[in-house]
């Protein structure tokens, strides 16, 4: 009798744990977090060696194919947009731009 209760309780706990893991999807969340950290290199690069190791390990475990490709590719910086010049800047100047003090 005790064995049967143990089996039923174990099955119920396993079913509940599987349901919660399916709803929460911690593996997918970890993969998305690690991919974002690797893709946008700003914070994880400046986070120190321990943070880099955790991010790289999490990404390598959750997405091995993608992480191998990303780690081999050189980092690219986002291009800074060039300022747009106004061709009519002389006509659109304010008094302070012209050098007037009053």
Image (cartoon, rainbow, N blue to C red):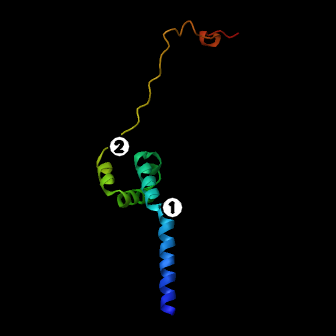
Asked whether the beta carbons under mark 2 and mark 1 sit within 8 Å of each other, the answer is no
Location of mark 1 (residue): 24
Name which quarter of the figure residue 100 lies in: top right
**Residue at point 45% right, 51% down?**
44
Q: Which mark is residue 11?
A: none
**Residue at point 38% right, 56% down?**
59
Distance, label 2 to label 1, CA atoms, is 32 Å
**Residue at point 52% right, 87% down?**
5
Sequence order check, earlier mark of 2 and 1: 1
Please state the horizontal and vertical placement of residue 64, each as a whole percent of the image. 32, 57
Element type at marker 2? Answer: loop
Farthest residue toward the top?
Answer: 91
Please state the horizontal and vertical placement of residue 50, each as a whole percent of the image. 44, 60
Farthest residue toward the bottom?
Answer: 1
Location of mark 2 (residue): 75
Disc 1: CA contacts within 10 A as few (<14), some (14-19) or many (>=20): few
Q: Is residue 82 left or right of residue 67?
A: right
Given residues 26 and 21, the one toward you in this image is 21
Element type at marker 1? Answer: helix
Q: Is residue 70 left or right of residue 1?
A: left
Farthest residue toward the right?
Answer: 102
């Amino acid at each position: 009798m005790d064995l049967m209760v143990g089996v039923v309780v174990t099955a119920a706990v396993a079913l509940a744990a599987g349901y919660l893991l399916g709803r929460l999807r911690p593996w997918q969340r970890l993969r998305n977090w690690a991919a974002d950290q690797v893709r946008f290199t700003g914070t994880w690069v400046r986070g120190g060696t321990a943070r880099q190791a955790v991010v790289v390990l999490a990404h390598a475990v959750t997405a091995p194919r993608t992480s191998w490709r990303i780690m081999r590719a050189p980092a690219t910086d986002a291009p800074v947009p060039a300022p747009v010049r106004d061709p009519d800047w002389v006509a659109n100047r304010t008094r302070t731009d012209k050098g007037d003090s009053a």
